[in-house]
Image (spheres, rainbow, N blue to C red):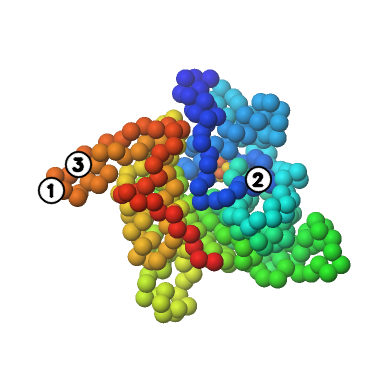
Amino acid sequence: MEAGSQRHWAYAMIADVTIEWTDTTWDPLVGCTRKSAACRHCYAEALTAASAQDKQWGYGFAEVGPAGPSWTGAIALREDRLALPLAWDAPRRILVNALSDLFHESAPIETIDRVFAIMALAPRHIFQILTKRPKIMQTYIADKATPGRITHEIDEIAPDPNSHAIAAWPLPNVWLGVTAENQKEAERRIPVLLQTPAAVRWVAAEPLLEPLELKLGTWLRDAPQRVASSGIGPWLDWVVAGGEIGVDAQPCHPDWARSLRDQCAKGGTAFYWRQWGEYIPTVGVTAGAGPEPIPLTWERLGARPATRTLDGFLHETFPET
Ligand code: SF4
Protein backbone atom coordinates (compact mmCIF):
# COMPACT_ATOMS: atom_id res chain seq x y z
CA MET A 1 0.00 0.00 0.00
CA GLU A 2 1.50 3.33 -1.01
CA ALA A 3 1.59 6.27 1.38
CA GLY A 4 -1.41 8.16 0.01
CA SER A 5 -3.61 5.10 0.19
CA GLN A 6 -2.50 4.43 3.74
CA ARG A 7 -3.51 7.93 4.72
CA HIS A 8 -6.81 7.60 2.90
CA TRP A 9 -7.51 4.29 4.60
CA ALA A 10 -6.49 5.53 8.01
CA TYR A 11 -8.62 8.62 7.58
CA ALA A 12 -11.64 6.65 6.52
CA MET A 13 -11.33 4.50 9.63
CA ILE A 14 -11.66 7.50 11.93
CA ALA A 15 -14.03 9.61 9.86
CA ASP A 16 -16.93 11.08 11.75
CA VAL A 17 -19.95 9.70 9.89
CA THR A 18 -22.59 11.50 11.94
CA ILE A 19 -25.36 12.54 9.58
CA GLU A 20 -27.07 15.51 11.17
CA TRP A 21 -30.22 15.54 9.02
CA THR A 22 -31.35 12.10 10.09
CA ASP A 23 -32.01 10.44 13.45
CA THR A 24 -30.89 6.92 12.66
CA THR A 25 -29.30 4.97 9.84
CA TRP A 26 -30.72 1.59 8.84
CA ASP A 27 -28.64 -0.67 6.62
CA PRO A 28 -30.60 -3.69 5.44
CA LEU A 29 -28.24 -4.08 2.48
CA VAL A 30 -24.51 -4.70 2.50
CA GLY A 31 -22.21 -4.14 -0.49
CA CYS A 32 -22.12 -1.61 -3.31
CA THR A 33 -19.97 -0.40 -6.25
CA ARG A 34 -18.81 3.07 -7.13
CA LYS A 35 -21.02 5.02 -9.50
CA SER A 36 -19.76 8.59 -9.86
CA ALA A 37 -17.41 11.26 -8.49
CA ALA A 38 -19.35 11.42 -5.22
CA CYS A 39 -18.19 7.87 -4.46
CA ARG A 40 -14.49 8.87 -4.49
CA HIS A 41 -14.21 8.94 -0.70
CA CYS A 42 -16.94 6.42 0.09
CA TYR A 43 -16.83 5.77 3.84
CA ALA A 44 -19.18 2.80 3.38
CA GLU A 45 -16.51 1.03 1.36
CA ALA A 46 -13.91 1.68 4.06
CA LEU A 47 -16.17 0.61 6.92
CA THR A 48 -17.27 -2.53 5.10
CA ALA A 49 -13.65 -3.44 4.28
CA ALA A 50 -12.66 -2.86 7.91
CA SER A 51 -15.41 -5.19 9.02
CA ALA A 52 -14.30 -7.76 6.43
CA GLN A 53 -10.79 -7.79 7.87
CA ASP A 54 -12.27 -9.11 11.11
CA LYS A 55 -14.45 -11.52 9.12
CA GLN A 56 -17.53 -9.67 10.38
CA TRP A 57 -20.58 -8.47 8.42
CA GLY A 58 -18.54 -6.93 5.61
CA TYR A 59 -16.72 -10.14 4.76
CA GLY A 60 -17.09 -10.89 1.06
CA PHE A 61 -18.47 -7.45 0.25
CA ALA A 62 -15.32 -5.28 0.45
CA GLU A 63 -11.64 -5.98 0.96
CA VAL A 64 -8.35 -4.21 1.52
CA GLY A 65 -5.98 -4.39 -1.43
CA PRO A 66 -2.75 -2.63 -2.41
CA ALA A 67 -4.67 0.58 -3.19
CA GLY A 68 -6.79 0.49 -0.04
CA PRO A 69 -10.39 -0.65 0.47
CA SER A 70 -12.50 -1.70 -2.49
CA TRP A 71 -15.90 -3.25 -3.06
CA THR A 72 -16.07 -6.82 -4.32
CA GLY A 73 -19.35 -6.17 -6.19
CA ALA A 74 -21.39 -8.55 -4.02
CA ILE A 75 -24.70 -7.23 -2.64
CA ALA A 76 -26.92 -8.95 -0.08
CA LEU A 77 -29.84 -8.37 2.22
CA ARG A 78 -28.96 -8.60 5.91
CA GLU A 79 -31.92 -10.40 7.39
CA ASP A 80 -30.68 -9.58 10.92
CA ARG A 81 -31.12 -5.87 10.20
CA LEU A 82 -34.25 -5.96 8.10
CA ALA A 83 -36.90 -5.62 10.82
CA LEU A 84 -35.04 -3.16 13.07
CA PRO A 85 -37.37 -0.19 12.39
CA LEU A 86 -40.34 -2.22 13.62
CA ALA A 87 -38.73 -2.35 17.06
CA TRP A 88 -38.23 1.43 17.25
CA ASP A 89 -41.39 2.76 18.90
CA ALA A 90 -40.74 6.50 18.80
CA PRO A 91 -41.07 8.12 15.37
CA ARG A 92 -37.70 8.79 13.71
CA ARG A 93 -36.20 10.04 10.50
CA ILE A 94 -34.31 7.03 9.17
CA LEU A 95 -31.68 7.11 6.43
CA VAL A 96 -32.06 3.89 4.45
CA ASN A 97 -28.78 2.26 3.42
CA ALA A 98 -26.09 4.71 4.44
CA LEU A 99 -23.66 1.90 3.53
CA SER A 100 -25.12 0.85 0.18
CA ASP A 101 -27.61 1.88 -2.52
CA LEU A 102 -31.08 0.31 -2.35
CA PHE A 103 -31.43 0.65 -6.12
CA HIS A 104 -28.08 -0.89 -6.99
CA GLU A 105 -28.08 -2.75 -10.31
CA SER A 106 -27.41 -6.04 -8.48
CA ALA A 107 -30.04 -5.68 -5.75
CA PRO A 108 -32.78 -8.28 -6.43
CA ILE A 109 -36.27 -6.85 -6.76
CA GLU A 110 -37.47 -9.15 -3.94
CA THR A 111 -34.90 -7.49 -1.69
CA ILE A 112 -36.19 -4.03 -2.53
CA ASP A 113 -39.75 -5.28 -1.96
CA ARG A 114 -38.84 -6.55 1.50
CA VAL A 115 -37.27 -3.23 2.46
CA PHE A 116 -40.39 -1.39 1.27
CA ALA A 117 -42.58 -3.84 3.20
CA ILE A 118 -40.83 -2.84 6.42
CA MET A 119 -41.29 0.84 5.58
CA ALA A 120 -45.01 0.22 4.94
CA LEU A 121 -45.29 -1.57 8.28
CA ALA A 122 -43.75 1.39 10.15
CA PRO A 123 -45.72 4.48 9.05
CA ARG A 124 -44.68 6.30 12.24
CA HIS A 125 -41.17 6.72 10.82
CA ILE A 126 -39.93 8.79 7.90
CA PHE A 127 -37.59 6.83 5.63
CA GLN A 128 -35.03 8.84 3.67
CA ILE A 129 -33.78 7.02 0.59
CA LEU A 130 -30.84 8.37 -1.42
CA THR A 131 -29.66 6.81 -4.67
CA LYS A 132 -27.19 7.39 -7.46
CA ARG A 133 -29.29 5.08 -9.66
CA PRO A 134 -32.58 6.96 -10.12
CA LYS A 135 -33.65 5.16 -13.30
CA ILE A 136 -33.87 1.88 -11.41
CA MET A 137 -35.79 3.66 -8.65
CA GLN A 138 -38.18 5.23 -11.17
CA THR A 139 -38.86 1.88 -12.87
CA TYR A 140 -39.46 0.23 -9.51
CA ILE A 141 -41.83 2.90 -8.19
CA ALA A 142 -43.75 3.25 -11.46
CA ASP A 143 -44.27 -0.51 -11.90
CA LYS A 144 -47.98 -1.17 -11.31
CA ALA A 145 -47.10 -4.60 -9.90
CA THR A 146 -44.88 -3.16 -7.16
CA PRO A 147 -47.57 -2.46 -4.50
CA GLY A 148 -48.93 -6.01 -4.88
CA ARG A 149 -45.49 -7.55 -4.47
CA ILE A 150 -44.87 -5.42 -1.36
CA THR A 151 -48.22 -6.53 0.08
CA HIS A 152 -47.14 -10.11 -0.46
CA GLU A 153 -43.91 -9.43 1.44
CA ILE A 154 -45.85 -7.74 4.27
CA ASP A 155 -47.93 -10.89 4.62
CA GLU A 156 -44.72 -12.94 4.78
CA ILE A 157 -43.04 -10.68 7.35
CA ALA A 158 -46.05 -9.98 9.57
CA PRO A 159 -48.76 -12.62 8.96
CA ASP A 160 -52.10 -11.20 10.00
CA PRO A 161 -55.59 -12.41 9.03
CA ASN A 162 -56.55 -8.75 8.59
CA SER A 163 -53.52 -7.93 6.51
CA HIS A 164 -54.34 -6.24 3.23
CA ALA A 165 -52.99 -4.14 0.46
CA ILE A 166 -50.87 -1.14 1.36
CA ALA A 167 -53.02 1.93 1.91
CA ALA A 168 -51.30 4.39 -0.40
CA TRP A 169 -48.73 4.34 -3.16
CA PRO A 170 -46.17 5.86 -3.23
CA LEU A 171 -45.73 5.39 0.50
CA PRO A 172 -46.37 8.74 2.24
CA ASN A 173 -43.58 8.14 4.79
CA VAL A 174 -40.83 7.53 2.20
CA TRP A 175 -38.72 10.39 0.84
CA LEU A 176 -36.91 9.68 -2.42
CA GLY A 177 -33.64 11.48 -3.17
CA VAL A 178 -30.68 11.54 -5.54
CA THR A 179 -27.08 12.63 -5.13
CA ALA A 180 -26.03 15.59 -7.29
CA GLU A 181 -22.37 16.36 -6.64
CA ASN A 182 -21.86 18.32 -9.87
CA GLN A 183 -23.96 19.79 -12.67
CA LYS A 184 -23.52 16.75 -14.91
CA GLU A 185 -25.03 14.40 -12.34
CA ALA A 186 -27.72 16.94 -11.46
CA GLU A 187 -28.78 17.05 -15.15
CA ARG A 188 -28.79 13.25 -15.31
CA ARG A 189 -30.51 12.44 -12.07
CA ILE A 190 -32.86 15.25 -11.03
CA PRO A 191 -35.20 15.05 -14.07
CA VAL A 192 -35.59 11.31 -13.46
CA LEU A 193 -36.33 11.94 -9.80
CA LEU A 194 -38.95 14.52 -10.73
CA GLN A 195 -40.65 11.95 -12.97
CA THR A 196 -40.82 9.50 -10.07
CA PRO A 197 -43.93 9.48 -7.87
CA ALA A 198 -42.91 10.32 -4.29
CA ALA A 199 -44.24 11.98 -1.17
CA VAL A 200 -41.06 14.06 -0.91
CA ARG A 201 -38.30 14.47 -3.51
CA TRP A 202 -34.90 15.63 -2.39
CA VAL A 203 -31.33 16.17 -3.53
CA ALA A 204 -28.10 15.62 -1.64
CA ALA A 205 -25.51 17.98 -3.13
CA GLU A 206 -22.80 16.31 -1.08
CA PRO A 207 -19.93 16.27 -1.68
CA LEU A 208 -20.53 19.58 -3.41
CA LEU A 209 -17.76 19.61 -6.02
CA GLU A 210 -18.73 22.67 -8.06
CA PRO A 211 -21.45 25.34 -8.23
CA LEU A 212 -24.90 23.94 -9.04
CA GLU A 213 -27.72 25.53 -11.00
CA LEU A 214 -30.98 24.04 -9.75
CA LYS A 215 -33.18 25.65 -12.41
CA LEU A 216 -35.70 27.81 -10.62
CA GLY A 217 -39.11 27.22 -12.17
CA THR A 218 -38.09 23.81 -13.55
CA TRP A 219 -36.51 21.79 -10.73
CA LEU A 220 -37.18 24.27 -7.91
CA ARG A 221 -40.58 25.87 -7.72
CA ASP A 222 -40.72 29.62 -7.99
CA ALA A 223 -42.99 31.54 -5.68
CA PRO A 224 -45.83 32.54 -8.07
CA GLN A 225 -46.17 28.99 -9.35
CA ARG A 226 -46.24 27.68 -5.80
CA VAL A 227 -49.01 30.05 -4.77
CA ALA A 228 -51.03 29.47 -7.92
CA SER A 229 -51.05 25.68 -7.45
CA SER A 230 -51.05 25.60 -11.21
CA GLY A 231 -50.32 21.94 -11.54
CA ILE A 232 -46.85 22.72 -12.87
CA GLY A 233 -44.17 20.61 -11.30
CA PRO A 234 -43.46 18.47 -9.40
CA TRP A 235 -40.57 20.18 -7.70
CA LEU A 236 -37.69 19.39 -5.42
CA ASP A 237 -38.85 19.60 -1.81
CA TRP A 238 -35.50 19.54 -0.04
CA VAL A 239 -31.84 20.24 -0.77
CA VAL A 240 -29.08 18.98 1.53
CA ALA A 241 -25.52 20.07 0.83
CA GLY A 242 -22.02 19.74 2.24
CA GLY A 243 -18.32 19.61 1.38
CA GLU A 244 -16.02 16.72 0.54
CA ILE A 245 -14.15 14.70 3.16
CA GLY A 246 -11.03 12.63 2.41
CA VAL A 247 -7.28 12.88 2.22
CA ASP A 248 -7.26 14.58 -1.19
CA ALA A 249 -10.67 16.23 -0.85
CA GLN A 250 -11.17 19.56 -2.55
CA PRO A 251 -12.36 22.60 -0.60
CA CYS A 252 -15.96 23.70 -1.02
CA HIS A 253 -16.13 27.36 -2.04
CA PRO A 254 -18.53 29.33 0.16
CA ASP A 255 -20.10 30.89 -2.93
CA TRP A 256 -21.27 27.42 -4.03
CA ALA A 257 -23.03 26.98 -0.69
CA ARG A 258 -24.45 30.52 -0.79
CA SER A 259 -25.81 29.96 -4.26
CA LEU A 260 -27.70 26.82 -3.21
CA ARG A 261 -29.02 28.60 -0.12
CA ASP A 262 -30.24 31.53 -2.21
CA GLN A 263 -31.77 29.40 -4.97
CA CYS A 264 -33.71 27.42 -2.37
CA ALA A 265 -34.83 30.62 -0.62
CA LYS A 266 -36.23 31.98 -3.91
CA GLY A 267 -38.18 28.79 -4.50
CA GLY A 268 -39.31 28.34 -0.90
CA THR A 269 -37.46 25.01 -0.84
CA ALA A 270 -36.13 23.60 2.42
CA PHE A 271 -32.33 23.83 2.60
CA TYR A 272 -29.95 22.02 4.96
CA TRP A 273 -26.27 22.99 5.07
CA ARG A 274 -24.62 19.99 6.69
CA GLN A 275 -20.89 20.65 6.86
CA TRP A 276 -17.89 22.19 5.09
CA GLY A 277 -15.93 18.99 4.53
CA GLU A 278 -12.18 18.58 4.88
CA TYR A 279 -11.49 22.33 4.71
CA ILE A 280 -13.33 25.20 6.27
CA PRO A 281 -13.13 28.70 4.78
CA THR A 282 -11.70 31.06 7.37
CA VAL A 283 -10.64 34.47 6.10
CA GLY A 284 -12.80 35.70 3.24
CA VAL A 285 -15.92 33.81 4.15
CA THR A 286 -17.75 37.13 4.00
CA ALA A 287 -15.82 38.35 0.95
CA GLY A 288 -17.49 41.20 -0.82
CA ALA A 289 -18.92 42.83 2.30
CA GLY A 290 -16.25 45.54 2.43
CA PRO A 291 -14.61 47.83 -0.11
CA GLU A 292 -11.66 45.47 -0.60
CA PRO A 293 -12.31 41.81 -1.41
CA ILE A 294 -10.82 39.64 1.33
CA PRO A 295 -8.78 36.72 -0.04
CA LEU A 296 -10.31 33.36 0.72
CA THR A 297 -8.19 31.09 2.92
CA TRP A 298 -8.83 27.66 4.33
CA GLU A 299 -8.13 25.69 7.46
CA ARG A 300 -7.79 21.96 7.12
CA LEU A 301 -9.92 20.25 9.76
CA GLY A 302 -9.78 16.63 8.62
CA ALA A 303 -11.94 14.52 10.89
CA ARG A 304 -12.35 17.27 13.49
CA PRO A 305 -15.90 18.56 13.76
CA ALA A 306 -16.30 21.93 12.08
CA THR A 307 -18.72 24.73 12.61
CA ARG A 308 -21.72 24.11 10.41
CA THR A 309 -22.67 27.72 9.91
CA LEU A 310 -22.88 29.48 6.56
CA ASP A 311 -22.35 33.24 6.83
CA GLY A 312 -22.93 32.94 10.56
CA PHE A 313 -26.21 30.99 10.44
CA LEU A 314 -27.20 27.37 10.69
CA HIS A 315 -29.41 26.24 7.82
CA GLU A 316 -31.33 23.20 9.01
CA THR A 317 -34.78 23.22 7.47
CA PHE A 318 -36.76 20.13 6.51
CA PRO A 319 -39.54 19.72 3.97
CA GLU A 320 -43.13 19.95 5.09
CA THR A 321 -44.84 16.59 5.18
S1 SF4 B 1 -23.31 4.69 -4.10
FE1 SF4 B 1 -22.92 5.31 -1.96
S2 SF4 B 1 -22.33 3.44 -0.87
FE2 SF4 B 1 -22.17 3.01 -3.09
S3 SF4 B 1 -20.03 3.43 -3.59
FE3 SF4 B 1 -21.17 5.33 -4.00
S4 SF4 B 1 -21.01 6.53 -2.07
FE4 SF4 B 1 -20.44 4.39 -1.59
Q: Identify the element where label 1 is drawn.
A: loop
Give the CA distance from mark 3 to mark 1: 9 Å
Pointer 3 with pointer 1, Cβ within 8 A: no
Check mark 2 vs ligand 1: CB closer than 8 Å? yes or no: no
- Secondary structure of the residue carrying numbered label 3: loop
Residue at the spot 42% in from the left edge and 57% down from the top edge: 271
The residue indicated by pointer 2 is 27
Q: Label 1 belongs to which residue? A: 291
Residue 294: image tag: 3
* Quadrant of the rendering where the C terminus is positioned: bottom right
Q: Of 262 and 136, which appears nearest the observer? A: 262
Residue 312 makes an appearance in the image: yes
Which residue type carries mark 3?
Ile
Where residue 236 sits in the image (x, y, percent)? 47, 63
Q: Nearer the viewer, residue 80 or 65?
A: 80
- Residue 172, compared with residue 67, is above or below; it is below
Crowd around label 1: few <14 · some 14–19 · many ≥20 (10 Å)? few
Q: Quadrant of residue 52?
A: top right
